Image (cartoon, rainbow, N blue to C red):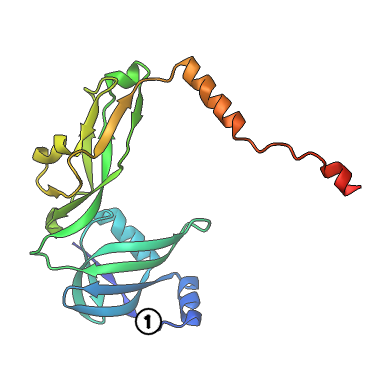
Amino acid sequence: MSTMQSKLRETNKTTLSQLRKDGWIPSVVYGYKTESTPISVKERDLIDTLRETGRNGVIKLDVDGKKVNVVLSDYQSDVLKGTITHADFLSINMTEELEVEVVINLIGQSPGEKEGGIIQQPIREVTIRVKPSDIPESIDLDVSELQIGDTLLVSDIRSKVAFEILNEDEDALVLVSAPRTEAELEELDETADAGAEPEVIGDDKAAE
């Protein structure tokens, strides 16, 4: 389990701006036997730790000299700068199950896709209940036997995983739809053209 250092912080805007400028991420830790505490962590440390443990991995966080088992509950980022601007760490009890979001990862190529079918993922993440030490980085779904028209539902994989999936049985994880016909593509083009904004008549006269 990776250990990451943190430091207590003040919450005024000037301090937050300076922390980010110096490469620190304003953060908060809360949860099991931990009062909500404003902290900051080095952005580089967090990135390196997540690469090692994965998005859902357990991190041993040093909070003012106390080691706390946490998971990254949430974070905000600056899309333009590509930086993390805030992080929430949830303190956990390693013996109790918790709910986490896990990514669905498709592996293989379906025969239906080879025939021109379109792979679709209505749901890219599922919510599971699991002990912290057993949290998977992702759930792999093999699509190598899916034909056009086939669908994989949550109910199809419940018995194949070692944890509880909290989504509904009928939630579709992946489906292979038939390729669109020329007539359907033309209809889509016509719909797009019809939705275009009409030209405003009389603007030139009004501008004179």
Q: Residue at x 24, y 68 (%)?
A: 90
Q: In the picture, residue 84 is in which quadrant?
A: bottom left
Closer to the camera, 156 or 102? 156
Q: Mark 1 belongs to which amino acid?
A: Arg
Picture coordinates of residue 165, whole percent (x, y): 16, 47
Q: In the picture, residue 173 is in which quadrant?
A: top left
Closer to the camera, 189 or 118? 189
- Residue that badge 1 annotates: 9
- Indicate whether 196 appears above or below 188: below
Picture coordinates of residue 112, whole percent (x, y): 30, 19
Say whether residue 3 is visible: yes
Picture coordinates of residue 74, whole percent (x, y): 32, 62
Say whether residue 143 is visible: no
Picture coordinates of residue 191, whole percent (x, y): 55, 29
**Outermost residue toward the right in this view:** 208
> How many marks overall?
1
Q: In the picture, residue 2 is in which quadrant?
A: bottom left
Quarter holding the N terminus is bottom left
- Indicate whether 65 appears above or below 156: below
Q: Residue at x 32, y 68 (%)?
A: 88
Q: Secondary structure at mark 1?
A: loop
Tag 1: Cα neighbours inside 10 Å, few (<14), some, or many (≥20)? some
Q: In the figure, is residue 2 to the left or right of 131?
A: right
Closer to the camera, 82 or 190? 190
Q: In the figure, is residue 124 to the left or right of 84?
A: left
Q: Residue at x 17, y 40 (%)?
A: 169
Q: In the figure, is residue 17 to the left or right of 133?
A: right
